[in-house]
Image (cartoon, rainbow, N blue to C red):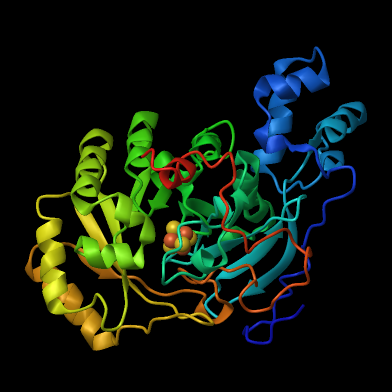
Amino acid sequence: MLYDCLPCRVDVNSSLRRLSEDEQGHRPVSEASFDDIRGVLGDVPVYRVEQVRHAVYRTPTTTFDKIQTLPATMRVLLGRQFSYEALETVRSEMSQDGTQKTLFRASDGAVVETVQMLTERSDSTTICLSSQSGCGMGCRFCATGDIGLTRNLTAGEIVDQFLYFRRRSKASRVPDRAVFMGMGEPLANLSALEPAVRALVDPSRVGLGARRVTISTVGLPKGIDALVDWNLPVGLAISLHAPVDDLRATLVPIAKRFPLDELMAVSSRFQRRVRRRVTYEYTMLDGVNDSVGQAVDLAVLLRGQRCHVNLIPFNPYPGSLYRTTPRLRLRAFRDALHAQGVRATIRRTRGRDISGACGQLHAGVLASPRAPGAMGKPKTNSLDTRNDISGKARSGKI
Ligand code: SF4
C-alpha cells in the first residue's frame, strides 16, 4: 500500500512477511541456544554455529536458504527445526514524522504492534517493543488496556520484533535502542522478558548495550526487585501518572495493590543498586492530574531521588475518556517541577496520525471490529497461566 501523506511516497508494505506452512509451529531460531543450534547441525565446528548466529542477528537475511556461508544441507536441517522469524506481518503504516507502526501476528493468531521511531538526530531509530498481546492492567487512558490481555509473548516473539526492523532498515534507520513501551506490562511476563533482554544485550547476538534498553512498568514491586537482581544496567521507567494513591488507583487500577510508599522504596533500591536514574512517566490529563498544586505534590513525593519526570501529553484514541492538557498548563506543570528541583521534560509525541503514539496501540481492535476468530481472542481479560506476576497479583499473592 502506498501512503500519500509522505513527502516521498514510501511503499512500506512491500516487505511484509508471511510465515510458510513449514515455519508455523516451529520454535524461532532466536530462542535457540548455541548448543541447540549445534545439536541440530550435528558434530560441526564451533564456527558453523557462529555463522548461523551472525546471519540471524547481524545481517539482513530473512530465510535460512539465503545464508550463503552455510552448505545447503545445513540450511535444510535448520529449516526443519526452527522458523527464521516468529511473527508474520499483517500491515505496516508510516507516519508523517517518520514513525513506522507494524502489526504482527503469531502462528496462533495473537496480534501485537511494534513501533519504530527516528531518534532526535534522525540517524538511527528506537524500537518500541511489546511484551504481551494486549494488556491486562486496564489503565484508564490506554487503548491497549481497553482491549485486555490475550497472552504473554515468548522471548523469541519479543526479540524478533527488534530483528524484523534491523533486517529491513536502511542505513539511516538502523535501530540501536529498544524500549519496552509497546503493548503489555513487561514485568508481568518476566520469564520471557529476561531471556529476551539478555539476547538484546548479548554482544554475540543482538549486541545492544544494556544502557540502550529501557523497561517501562506500571510499577510492580517484585518485578522491579527482579530487575535489580539481573545485574544489568538497563533503564527503568515507572508509569506514575498521579502524585497521590487515590487518584493513581483510579487511573492505574493495579496501583490499588501497591501504594506509592512501597513503589518509591523499591524505585530507590533500583537507583542505589543499579546506579541508574529512574524515569517517571506522567501522562497529562486535562483537569485530572495537571494542576500546579499536583506538580508540587509530585515534587514532594520524589524528593531526594535520582530521577527524571517525562510529561506525556495524552494521546486520544477512539472512545478515550480524557482530553489532552493544553500546552500552557503543560509548561506550567513542568516549570513548577523545575522550581522544586525536579528534572522534567515534555515528551515529543510521535506517530499520532497512525495511532502509534504512547497509549494508542490497539492492533486495530478498537478501530475496526474483526470477524470472530480472525486473529486470536483479543477481547479476553483472562490471564495466561504463564503470566507469572500479574497472575499472582490477581490472586492476591503479591
Ligand atoms: S499503559 Fe501499559 S500497562 Fe497500562 S494498560 Fe496500557 S500497555 Fe498496559
- Residue 46 image point, x, y percent: 70, 17
User: Quick check: which quadrant has ligand 1?
Assistant: bottom left
* Horizontal relation, residue 278 to residue 60: left or right: left
Residue drawn at (39%, 38%), measured in percent from left and top? 397
| Quarter where residue 26 is shown | top right
Instruction: Pick whichever, 218 or 80, lies toward us.
Output: 218
Figure quadrant of the N terminus: bottom right
Instruction: Pick whichever, 116 or 388, lies toward us.
Output: 388
Residue 374, above or below 67: below
Residue 182, above or below 284: above
* Horizontal relation, residue 346 to residue 166: left or right: left
- Residue lying at the far front of the rendered structure: 395
- Residue 258 image point, x, y percent: 29, 49
| Quarter where residue 322 is shown | bottom left
- Residue 6 image point, x, y percent: 63, 83
- Residue 287 image point, x, y percent: 26, 83
| Quarter where residue 38 is shown | top right
Can residue 22 be seen in the rendering of this structure?
yes
Q: How many marks?
A: 0
Instruction: Pick whichever, 174 or 79, lies toward us.
Output: 79
Can residue 282 be seen in the rendering of this structure?
no
Residue 327, above or below 116: below
Residue drawn at (42%, 81%), measured in percent from left and top? 321
Residue drawn at (31%, 50%), measured in percent from left and top? 257
Residue drawn at (49%, 51%), measured in percent from left and top? 178
* Horizontal relation, residue 265 to residue 119: left or right: left
Figure quadrant of the C terminus: top left
